[in-house]
Image: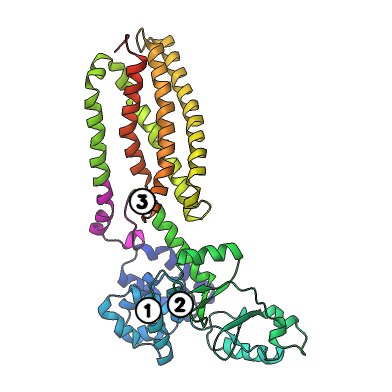
Amino acid sequence: MSPETEPILEDELRDAWPVLSPRDRVEGFRLLPPASADDFFLSLSSQEQAGLLMALLPGERRTWMRVLAPDDAADVIQQLPPEERGTFLTLLDDISRREVQALLAYEEDEAGGLMNPRFVRVRPDSSIDEALTYLRKQAREKVETVYYGYVLDAEQHLLGVVSLRQLFQASPGKVVRDVMRTDLVTVTEETDQEVVGRLFAEHGLAAIPVMDSQGHMKGIVTVDDIVSVVQDEATEDIQKVGGMEALDAPYFEVGFVAMLKKRAGWLLILFVSEMLTATAMARYEAEIARAVVLSLFVPLIISSGGNAGSQASTLVIRSLALTEVRLRDWWRVMRRELLSGVALGAVLGTVGLIRILLWQAAFHSYGEHATRVAITVGLSVLGVVTWGTLSGSMLPFVLRRLGFDPASASAPFVATLVDVSGLVIYFTTAEFVLRGALL
């Protein structure tokens, strides 16, 4: 195979990968040149790596397991069936196996479960030249990153951090202690991965040290580790907001039955909830019989409120996830969304009112009481949109306060809630405005 065709083959395999069977994936992977195969394997998700390793021959498994850094190997082990994990651990060398077993003791969503125990260690009293020489030596030993050296004392307490740039710019007569930075951003082993992700975003770091309860440095979490975590968290939230359980695998890798289970639960809950809409309609059956024209605007009313509520809940859920809004800010959000709901409702209600009056003037579609009907629709839209916006924005706060994931306040759920209450607002307004006319 000529060098010119290598990137094409790798790109073609990457494009086709999601729809290939395990057997086809193995065959395609074996066709890659060694250099391309390394890059391709390391670019796969831990779940895809685990699936590929399961399909390879035992000798091939050993080779590719040893390519992985300890934290990546731990991620792959966690994706394997429990009965296979011990077998794959034995494929690692003794040092790597001990490191991976230590990482597996942590929860997957904790900093300890994300960290790599291999990092550049530097003594505070080393000269600049000694530090650079030692850094080169450690770089050859597959440390996670060589951009930073972590200055540790004899008990492995973190004293500071020094970058390559600082070492190269320092005069030879200085020691590491003279150039290291001591304003450190660290996390504990139990720090949640979402908090770690926010620290990377706030400080623009390439790596963050992980400390144990005694202040010993245990490893580092790098930005490339957290990128996939942030992507997974965002994907999970988006799927929940869409009104379903979060998928635990890429779309094409989730079985048909498993996909149905993920989607059917919420759909059943929403379907049963929507039955309350029929109950509300039955409550106002007499009013509808006397003023059939009211039924024409039911979809308009409830969809306006549902859309406004879905919009508000999505905004607040994402703001909570990004910590732009905190639980204590609920009152400020309520005031803001109340005003927004009134303003949006007034705009939509006015458009609805004008539309009815124009159609009445042009086609005489709504009878002699069309003006009152228009006022009813306009006021109802104002009330329903205001209520939808308010309830959609507050539901995520309620869920967070109760200890649930705010993303569970999905757009379909909010829309269903507002549908039922919107009918009550609509027909209550109609009883008031149309009394003595149609009702």
- The relative height of residue 336 versus residue 9 in the rendered view (above or below) is above
Q: How far is the residue under mark 2 from the one under mark 3?
A: 40 Å
- At label 1, which amino acid type do we have? Leu
Rounded to the nearest whole Å, what is the CA distance between mark 1 and mark 2? Answer: 27 Å
**241 is higher (above) or lower (below) than 65:** above
CA separation in Å, label 3 and label 1:
29 Å
Which dot, 1 or 2, sits closer to the camera?
1
Q: Which mark is residue 93?
A: none
Element on which disc 3 rests: helix
Left or right relative to 268: residue 125? right
- Return the disc, 1 or 2, that comes first in the chain's sequence: 2
| Of residues 91 and 271, the one drawn nearer to the viewer in this rendering | 271
Q: Does dot 1 land on a helix, a strand or a loop?
A: helix
Q: Amino acid at mark 2?
A: Ala
- The secondary element bearing badge 2 is classed as helix
Q: Report the side of 33 relative to 437 (left or right).
A: right
Q: Residues within 10 Å of mark 2 (few under 14, many from 20)?
A: some
Q: Residue under circle 3?
A: 408
- Prevalent SS, magenta region: helix
* Residue highlighted by disc 2: 37
| Nearer-N-terminus badge (2/3) | 2
Which region shows up in magenta? 244-267
Decide: is 200 above or below 345: below
Residue located at (44% from left, 14% from top) = 357
Is disc 3 in contact with disc 1, using a CB cutoff of under 8 Å? no
Q: How far across and down, in percent of the image, does residue 32 sit?
A: 44, 76
Checking the image for residue 104, the label placed there is 1
- Tell me if residue 392 is in the magenta stretch: no
